[in-house]
Image (cartoon, rainbow, N blue to C red):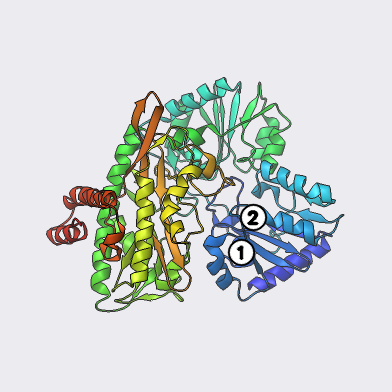
Amino acid sequence: MDTQKKIDLLQNALKTSNLDAYIIPSGDPHQSEYLAGHWKGREWISGFTGSAGTVVITQDHAGLWTDSRYFIQAEEELADSDMILHKLKVPHSAEHISWLKKVIPAGSTVACDGILFSYGQITKIKEELKPVGINVKEDIDLLAPIWTDRPSLPLKTIFEHDIKFASISRNEKIEQIRTKMKEQGAKYHWISTLDDIAWTLNIRSSDVECNPVSISYLMIGLNKVHFLIEKEKVNPELVEVFKEDNIHISSYNGVLDFINAFEFSGPILVNPSHCNYLVYSALKSKELIEGPTIPLHLKAIKNEGEIKHIKNAMIKDGVALTKLFRWLFATVKQRKVKETEVAKVLANFRSQQADYFGESFDAIVGYNGNGAIVHYHAKEETCAEIEDKGILLLDSGGQYFDGTTDVTRTVAIGEPTEEQKTNFTLVLKGHIQLDSAVFPKGTMGLQLDAMARMHLWKARLNYGHGTGHGVGFFLNVHEPPQGFAASAVTSRGVTPILEGTLTSNEPGFYKTGEYGIRIENLVVCKKVEENEFGTFLGFEPVTLFPIDQKLIQHHLLTKAEVNWLNNYHEKVQRLLSEHLDEDEKKWMKEQCKSI
């Protein structure tokens, strides 16, 4: 069924149901960024494969709202249907609601499937539409009758994340959570977010591609823990281990029955921004305390054991990247290489490393103009072929039992232009500026984000995405709450950067149709000094791979920036070389030579 046929069927369903508009988010019952196929309804109805966007369909209009990271991709993927691209002016904002207020009259009804929205999102939509006389029905699933080949719910088996990697036992984590619960006067804590559940219980799975999580809910009481997951996903040995830890298993699909039947003896702590509307509405009949999801903030602070493991994972990732780029540079001298082949070869080199589990996201392999598409996804039948010229942007990451990686390098395959070298150097200066920052405790990502842009701004250039995101520990590659963002719309911009957090530093520049530039390292926040003016923090880069010196305009770098680059490359060469063969060591030495 093509996209236009799907739109026609849904518009007919609107007319039959006497509804005026239907909202389809990029979401699931757990407010996940990356979705299991069962919940990729927005992708199915629109044909747009990006990870962020909202579709609104009225009886005579079909539109997709997404941000600047996806403008080029969306224009290409929507070209063969009547789906209209609405370009967000502010990323992550609900501009589709403002649009609805303008185009449908008072007395109209907007519908959506409440299980795909948080309680907070539905509340906000109602608050926006009620004053103009527009009604909201939040329990309508119009996709189910027309999505006849919809994937079933995933049922992948869960497994324990070995304590030698996790560092802290699930019982210790549960007690940490209970301590925070007591401080807030809660007897129970409802947790819907999948990575928080995986972290708390020291379990992993593969229900969501590239994200080692399992579809489930978790409720922690002061005495018992209730884990809502389909029983066939838990092997008998682990069931017994859970029993010993006083963790009781109930049906995931029976979540509403569980809530309605459970005899709560006190207040439940729940985050209305993380809990879906239908589950929250069931919990709302009980005594609630609204507050942050406790594991969200606990897991953001990596402990000493986790940081040690993360650094080891970075060595393995650096070795895999070394093998990949040496293969690529040699191969393009003999033949053209498809972008998709690069991703496959890199995944294979990663798979040769110890404790590899999979990729942390689908690699972005953008050659020349494709590099300007921020979240580009190469397809076998349409991707570019890399030749012995031009520049390549490669953004990729791996999942290892001892850490999650995310690294971007932009490399010159042939001789770069002066413009490319200048813009690359401006991006590098911003990367170094942020990496070298020293700031007082309590400084937010919004304040630090500008450091990565200042040199581009002076040249009247910019980029349309955030400068960094939190990263999990053998968990989701995008992990809230902290990050570097130019806007306060998301929590990423207004969350303080704390000691122990793992965050990406990835400024960029993109020239549509010609090339893209991005340099990304992961950095651990560490204490620099404590004095009478407070505690000052800084960053330690943990990603290990050379930055392409062929793309650098040396005269644009200050002495301090040259020292940073030389020190970084000395570290890369020292830590990777003992894991490389003789030819690879020679190559690495050349890539890391001092300037």
Q: Residue at x 36, y 62 (%)?
A: 424
Residue 142 position within the rendered picture, expressed as x and y whole percent measured from the top left: 73, 58
Q: Which residue is mark 1?
A: 44
Q: Quadrant of the N terminus?
A: bottom right
- Say whether disc 1 or disc 2 marks the residue closer to the N-terminus: 2
Q: Quadrant of residue 498?
A: top left
The answer to whether residue 16 is left or right of residue 9 is right
Residue 46 position within the rendered picture, expressed as x and y whole percent measured from the top left: 63, 66
Q: Relative to 454, say whether 480 is above or below.
A: above
The answer to whether residue 590 is left or right of residue 335 is left
Q: Residue furthest bottom?
A: 335
Residue 413 position within the rendered picture, expressed as x and y whole percent measured from the top left: 30, 71
Q: Nearer the viewer, residue 89 or 5?
A: 89
Q: Which residue is mark 2?
A: 25
Q: Residue furthest left?
A: 582
Label 2 residue SS: loop
Residue 45 position within the rendered picture, expressed as x and y whole percent measured from the top left: 64, 65
Whether residue 147 appears in this view of the structure is no
Q: Nearer the viewer, residue 549 or 247?
A: 549
Name which residue type carries label 2. Pro
Q: Residue at x 60, y 52 (%)?
A: 92
Q: Residue at x 37, y 52 (%)?
A: 431
Q: Relative to 575, say whether 519 is above or below.
A: below
Q: Quadrant of the C terminus?
A: bottom left
User: Neighbour class for label 2 at 10 Å: few (<14), some, many (≥20)?
Assistant: many
Viewer-side label of 1, 2: 2
User: Neighbour class for label 1 at 10 Å: few (<14), some, many (≥20)?
Assistant: some
Q: Quadrant of residue 340?
A: bottom left
Name which residue type carries label 1. Trp
